[in-house]
Image (cartoon, rainbow, N blue to C red):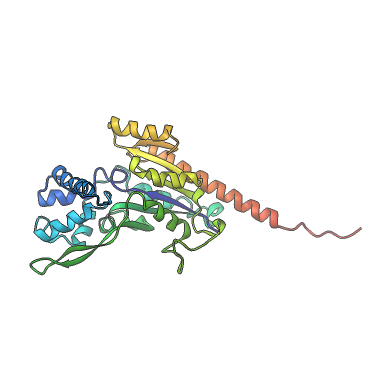
Amino acid sequence: MANIIAVIWDCDKTLVDGYMQDPIFEEYGIDPIEFWKEVNAKPKEYEKAGIRVNKDTYYLNHFIKCAHNGTLKGLNNKKLRAYGEKQKFYKGIPEIFEKTKQMFRDDKTYSEYGIQVEHYIVSTGFAEIIRGSKLMPFVDGIWGCELLETPDAEGNLVIGEILYTIDNTTKTRAIFEINKGIGKIEGIEVNSKIPQENRRVHFENMIYIADGPSDIPAFSVVKRNGGATFAIYPKGDWKAMRQVEQMREDGRVDMYAEADYSEGTTAYMWITNKIQKIADRIRDTEKAKITSSASGVPRHLV
């Protein structure tokens, strides 16, 4: 039975108040505004020369360059993972992860049908930073950028090659991989032909949570296939609020709220209520299957 409820999260400005790279800049004394200005300038130069650039992941090249020229001296995967401990999460994180995973564990009316909640993070950021964060005990899968270490000029291992990337379009591929159970079921690949009813996580059992227009491709895939979508904006940020309100008006998201997941907030109540509704639907569907397949009680012929 594919009775898993998957809550799929973006990371920056959705779980983290700001960007996951902020602690790196702080430690190395780098002005983040100038850093990102440099990152954004290069793709424009290449595009003028007729060279196509993936703007979502080009920043990885700049991090690698800085690790090798000494600007980010010693930056390796171990250090990236350590920055996970310094992430500034919004209120209620990771508590909402833990609480929702426990919602049906001790309730036999749901657990007997194998209903459970899983959390996934799909991010254009560093997977290692996420792995080093306090989220990890409650996360069932991570899709993020992976880097290989190579020696710098002094022979020390630092980030040096790009192994795997996620951008705002390929997030949709990650959603299909979650849908089919890649990483959970041996031998399954994203292009494997699997009937919808046999897939590990049905789209209608998904909730996708992110912060803005860059996630529209992922919002669209989940919503078009019957899942739920939820947008977040920072408290007091009128521009961000207007963006997510426009996405709601355009039918991209079902609901939005301020970025606070503490118990009793709009975000907490909407997410937990949606999980409960999905669980109720799954339970009722499974009950109906059993009832319809049960044969009547044999009676003596008169």
Judge whether residue 211 can be spotted in this image: no
Going by the image, does 193 lie left or right of 126?
right
Q: In the image as oriented, which residue stretches furthest toward the right?
A: 302
146 or 268, nearer to the observer: 146
243 or 120, nearer to the observer: 243
- Residue 131 appears at what percent x and percent y? 28, 58
Going by the image, does 257 lie left or right of 81?
right
- Residue 32 appears at what percent x and percent y? 15, 45
Q: Please, is residue 208 above or below residue 131 in the view? A: above
- Residue 3 appears at what percent x and percent y? 52, 55
- Residue 146 appears at what percent x and percent y? 27, 60
1 or 159, nearer to the observer: 159
Q: Which residue is found at the position 92% from the left and 58% from the top?
A: 302
Going by the image, does 68 lie left or right of 100?
left
187 or 84, nearer to the observer: 187
Q: Which residue is found at the position 50% from the left and 59% from the top?
A: 200
Judge whether residue 299 can be spotted in this image: yes
Q: Which residue is found at the position 56% from the left and 47% from the top?
A: 281
The quarter in which the N terminus is drawn is: bottom right
**Location of residue 271 (image quadrant):** top left
**Location of residue 294 (image quadrant):** bottom right
Q: Please, is residue 114 above or below residue 220 in the view? A: below
